[in-house]
Image: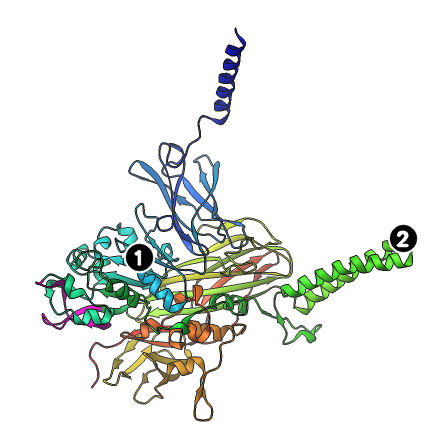
Amino acid sequence: MSRRGATWTGTWVAALMLMLASGGPPTHGAEPGRFDVAAGFGGRWKVGSWTPLVVSATGGGLEAGQEVRLWAEDDDGQFVRSPAVRATQVGDRVEARLCVRFGRPSGRYRVEVTSPGGGAATTEDRLVDPIVSTDHVIVAYGDLPSVARAARLVDRDRGSTTVVVSDTPPYAASESQRSFDAADAIVISGHAATRLPVDVREGLDAWVRDGGSLVFVCGASAAEAAATGSPVSGWLPGAFEKLVRLRRLGPIEAYARAGGLVDRVPPDGLPVPRFAGPTPGIVLVSAVEAGGGPVVARWAHGLGTVIWLGLDLDAEPLRGWSGCDTLLAAALGGRSRGGLDQRSSEQAGMPDMAGQLHAALDTFPAAATSADQATAGRKVSPVPFEVIAGLGLLYVLCLYPLDWWFVSKQGRPWIAWLTLPILAAGFTAAAWGLKGQWGGGREAIARTADVIDVDAGSGHIRGTSWLAVLSPVNDRLTVAVEGATGTACADRQAAVTWWGVAGRGFGGLDAAVGHPSLAAADYGYGGSLAALDDVPIAAAASRLFEAEWSGCADVPVVTSSLALTSQATLAGAVSHHLPFPIENCRLLHAGWLYDVGTLRPGDRYDTATGRGPRSLASALTRRAAAKDRETALTWDPTNADVARIIEVAAFQGAAGGTAYTGLDAGRLGRLDLSPLLAVDRAVLVGTVAEGVPASRWDIGGGAGPMAAAAAAPPLCRIVIPLAAEAVP
């Protein structure tokens, strides 16, 4: 054999051996035996929010009935294992639907598939194209290019950053409202709503009822939307009757602040739908012909709101009209206060209101015992970074040049064998003293904060809870949550997760380098999202968690005859039937507040005999009269009063929004019920009586169960529908 022939033979033998060793040529995407992961909305996902995923495979690798788990990074870069989900056969594919949170922009994850024999196969990959945790997100369904332009108008008014994502098949979202956790608002056209899968429509509706904001763009397509049935028909302002033609388009142009619509509409007019019965909520634009009727309206839908635009902005003659942008901008709240005074910014290291609450809960009361009365009244909080950095810098300076100079001056090098351990021991004692100064080294402490929201119309109950745990030793925690036993609530569902701080600051979710945890170890959920097992925590360190639970009241929540008067104030009476008293109770609607006091179950409050009304904004901002003028207390972003932070976050829009706080709401934005006050709803708000649990946390560690103390009285809010007929 020639030398050339021998060379080619050797090359082919080597290539064959490499292919056999690697199991054949590499596979990509949806090739047989390869996992395909679809995440978020059209592949976009937000750091720090729940993200829906679909893990699928064709031609092997995943079989129906197998258990699938997904490991995703938390805010410290530790992997958290999701509960198991069984794979199902869907057409020619086998898939499993999950919902997890990614705490790092790297998007790393592991897919774990358990075989019937008990063995587990794991593959690792990462998601791309993340959305930073501080950005606002609008999810669009349908061919609506004007949504992106409207978002830019809103950002110009508010000084915010909004990312518009279009969700397209294959849809990762499911029937759970957590699928839409990343969304601040959802815009959907009537044509798109009728074509969405049933589980996506149900999840979207659950998200709105749980406090979301839906913009439903549905004009002539209302007939098709109404025929689709629930929940899409529930996003219309009534039972569809017919389509009518509008020729007088002035009100629409005035609301959109744009002209030229008359030139685009055919002579026979613009088709708009008509509905039977009164329109819920408030009508923003009415037709002036064809018997009147709403064209733009807003109403409450559970704890959230629906803004309905009775125009098909995705079809001619409206498609391309400049007024589409301003119409949607108004629907998204861009003209709510209009101006640069709404611009938010990071203040005092706080990225948003959620970050301020995080810092406040991460400040613990020092435990005072008979042997340590000196600590009474002190607070346990993390040692400031400046102190740690300063101590380290001082240590380096003492070693060089101070120690070097001292030894050199003495001319006795052996002295370094004495000065080095003295310096090390001294700085160790200083570090130990700092830990004691900031409250470390004492018994484990757990603090909670809670908000309970009840929709009296549907009986839906939503609980939101936060937990902070400080441990004096290295430990592994078991953390579980469930809905309060003190509330008359059935069909409870709960989910607990880690809680991180948004932004690019030190330890933030979007930081280039993850927070260096001293207890780096993976952990995971038990059988459901209600419990986390083996959560690592370092000595003298803290861990923070957030949780949500929901259910349905098994008894009527309120008895109410409240209605609006011609002066836009409230008249009538209300009583609640929750199994606990509500203290410091107030009744809110529009810009007014009525002082109620303590309201026990069955007690009746009548606006005719009670105090009020007074300004809601003045009460929230605590304005006081000073020399014939009102002055509001400036919001302090370093304030660690948990009750005060929750009080303002619960109605931040009514308090003036970022014009008052200077901070974006962050993840606390879902708690703001201010939009409901502007429609046909009143809110009864107060604190839960002492001793009544709002959420029950079960915390276990190496030393046994740990009791949690409330950092503030739980806040309770009841959303009450107002009577349709106004009181004269």
Q: Which circle marks residue 551 in the picture? A: none
Q: Residues within 10 Å of mark 1 (few under 14, many from 20)?
A: many
**Residue at horizontal 39%, vertical 68%?**
158
* Residue 518 % position (x, y): 62, 54
Q: Is residue 11 above or below residue 494?
A: above
Q: Which residue ends up furthest to the right in the rendered image?
A: 411
Q: Is residue 82 above or below residue 698?
A: above
Taking 703 as reference, is 263 left or right?
A: left
**Residue at horizontal 63%, vertical 63%?**
385
Which residue does the numbered mark 2 point to in the structure image? Answer: 414
Which residue does the numbered mark 1 point to in the structure image? Answer: 204
- Please state the extent of the stretch shown in magenta in the rendering: 267-296
Q: Secondary structure at mark 1?
A: helix
Of label 1 and label 2, which has the lower sequence position? 1
* Residue 557 % position (x, y): 32, 72
Residue type pointed to by label 2: Trp
Q: Residues within 10 Å of mark 2 (few under 14, many from 20)?
A: few
Is residue 458 visible from the viewing direction of this image? no
**Residue at horizontal 9%, vertical 70%?**
290
Cα gap from disc 1 to disc 2, whole angstroms: 74 Å
Residue type pointed to by label 1: Leu
